[in-house]
Image (cartoon, helix red, strand yellow):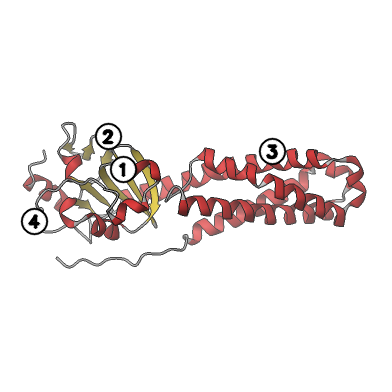
Amino acid sequence: MTSHQPARSTRPPLTVRSHLALRLAGASLLLGLLGPFGTYLGMPLPIRLLHFSANVLVIGALIVLGNMALRRFVFAGEPPLWAALCVALAAALPGAVVVQWHLSLLAPASLAFVTFPELLAQTAVVNLLISTVGWFVERRMQAGAASRSAGGSVSREEAPASPPTPATAVSRPDQPFDARLPFRLRGASILSLSAEDHYLRVRTSRGEALILCALSEAIGLLGETAGLRVHRSHWVSWTALALPDTRLGRDGLHVAEAGDLPVSRRGRRLLAEAGVA
């Protein structure tokens, strides 16, 4: 069967970029209005807004670059909260240097009342707070994208007309797809794949991860005979289908160790032909 494979986008969706810009602008405005760490005493409002906008822009860029490096080279997907907080702490030292420099330009008299260790601690606290809020907001955005994807209409891009010969869907270290997974998941059995906007949720026997990859591309890397595409946005491996607790119900396919997946009409027919009930 010839299927249309969407072009893979290596750029984040516009909504994510817009959200990041709004978050940084909101943090700058809030800090400028509140005047934390005594800045409300030594700086008028316009200077405070300029001071915190410059700080948030530079320190925010450091944190974003750190998370991008983790996403690409360590986790092959969105980093967990603990990793994002480590990046926030690592950015505190250069961030404190930036804050001190900005103070020397905008309010040099204030440097007589604050030491560098105090600036370092203050920068670390702000970094941790903003990174924590941002991490949870981004997860909510990803969950919303997943819900919209799962609630779509019957597939326009379906699985093959007849079920392929079952094959064990174990992602081995020598497989190209395995290199895209976080280190902790490499070599694990792939159970299911779900498209979420520009990302792909990979569920394995050791847990799950979100990576930047098109569903059609992932299926091609794993092999057409490794499983069934039961929905436009969802694929399940023969390994998962062979598990005792995997079953097909009225609301979709319950995959043991991987949760529930929606199934299109054609996907139900393919599962029935494969003997999944």
Determine which residue is flagged by label 4.
162
Q: Secondary structure at mark 4?
A: loop
Under mark 4, the amino acid is Ser
Determine which residue is flagged by label 3.
125
Q: CA distance from mark 4 to mark 2?
A: 26 Å
Q: CA distance from mark 2 to mark 3?
A: 38 Å
Determine which residue is flagged by label 1.
203
Q: CA distance from mark 1 to mark 2?
A: 8 Å
Q: CA distance from mark 1 to mark 3?
A: 34 Å
Please tell me which of labels 1 and 3 falls first in the chain. 3
Mark in the foreground, 4 or 3: 3
**Residue drawn 67% across the image and 48% down it:** 27
Q: Is residue 130 visible?
A: no
Q: Nearer the viewer, residue 171 or 11?
A: 171
**Residue drawn 66% across the image and 43% down it:** 127
Q: Is residue 146 left or right of residue 240?
A: right
Contact? badges 1 and 2 (CB < 8 Å): yes
Under mark 3, the amino acid is Val
Determine which residue is flagged by label 2.
257
Q: Secondary structure at mark 2?
A: loop
